[in-house]
């Protein structure tokens, strides 16, 4: 009799341990869809890894499960299935798969969200820190999702890009023309400088010639060295 009791106790312990192990290995998680939600758009806090059928689930704004943080309760077998909590907003709604949908996102929607699920596999809980991005926020290269731009925004971006390109081309052409003119003026000035300036100064004495050469008459001396001889000749 004692042996049967020990076997029952061992089997019960194994069942409890197996149940705990199943809950640990099948822990639920929350993923935002899209991964990088943008202001004004919608996001779904998708719950995955739920063990068993869902009886009821609760959503909270924050990590603590209490009435002050309670957003909504969803019971699939009840109509209407959703009931409101203190943190409920008209933009929030529960889905049958225990997910939470938020429409028309605002920056105030950022923060921690917690889901508490009662299912066949036992109570299950998970939390997520939601971040809301601005539509102009730069998302690093390699990410799978990016904000959707309106047609007006796309047209404005294209128009600004085209205007920038036209301006750059115009400035480049003007600088190119100015460089060509300066180059031509520089070349013309240098060719003028290389001309022989001697024809402009024909009246300048050629310093290289010997002034004592026989090319022209040279004044040597006075014919009358003494003035008194000239006077004496006139007197006689």
Image (tube, rainbow, N blue to C red):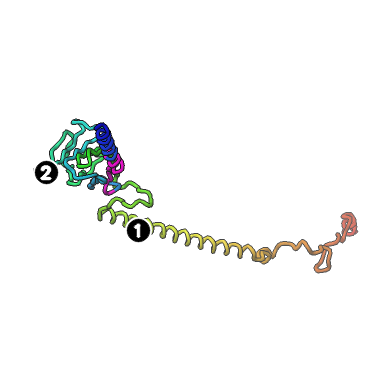
Front-most of residues 179 and 1 = 1
Q: Is residue 33 magenta?
A: yes
State whether residue 31 appears in this view: yes
Please give left or right for residue 142 compared with residue 224 in the image: left
Which residue does the image show at 51% across and 63% down from the upper left?
A: 180
Label 1 vs 2, first from the N-terminus:
2
* Position in image of residue 80 (x %, y %): 9, 43
Task: Look at the numbered disc 2 and give the secondary structure of its residue.
Answer: loop
Q: Is residue 206 above or below residue 75?
A: below
Q: Name the residue furthest front.
A: 1
Q: Is residue 2 above or below residue 179?
A: above
Give the labeled residue for mark 1: 162
Front-most of residues 52 and 70 = 52
Q: Residues within 10 Å of mark 1 (few under 14, many from 20)?
A: few
Q: Which mark is residue 100?
A: none
Give the labeled residue for mark 2: 77
State whether residue 113 appears in this view: no
- Quadrant for the N terminus, please: top left
Determine which quarter of the picture holds residue 107.
Answer: top left
Q: CA distance from mark 1 to mark 2?
A: 59 Å
Front-most of residues 74 and 7 = 7
Q: Residues within 10 Å of mark 2 (few under 14, many from 20)?
A: few
Q: Name the residue furthest left.
A: 79
Please give left or right for residue 178 compared with residue 40 in the image: right
Region of the chain picked out in magenta, as a range? 19-34
């Amino acid at each position: 009799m004692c042996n049967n009791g020990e076997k029952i106790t061992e089997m019960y312990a194994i069942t409890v341990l197996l149940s705990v192990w199943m809950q640990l290995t099948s822990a639920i998680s929350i993923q935002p869809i899209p991964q990088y939600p943008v202001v004004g758009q919608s996001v779904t806090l998708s719950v995955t890894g739920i063990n068993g059928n869902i009886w009821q689930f609760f959503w909270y704004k924050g990590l603590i499960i209490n009435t002050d943080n309670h957003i909504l309760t969803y019971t699939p077998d009840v109509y209407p299935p959703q009931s409101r909590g203190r943190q409920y907003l008209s933009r929030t709604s529960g889905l049958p798969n225990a997910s939470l949908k938020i429409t028309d996102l605002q920056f105030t929607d950022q923060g921690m969200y917690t889901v508490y699920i009662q299912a066949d596999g036992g109570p299950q809980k998970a939390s997520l820190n939601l971040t809301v991005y601005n539509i102009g926020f730069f998302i690093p290269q390699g990410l799978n999702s990016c904000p959707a731009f309106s047609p007006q925004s796309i047209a404005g971006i294209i128009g600004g890009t085209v205007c920038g390109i036209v301006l750059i081309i115009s400035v480049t052409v003007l600088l190119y023309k100015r460089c060509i003119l300066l180059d031509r003026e520089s070349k013309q000035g240098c060719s003028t400088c290389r001309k022989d300036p001697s024809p402009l100064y024909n009246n300048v004495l050629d310093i290289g010639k010997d002034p004592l050469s026989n090319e022209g008459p040279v004044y040597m001396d006075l014919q009358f060295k003494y003035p008194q001889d000239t006077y004496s000749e006139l007197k006689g």
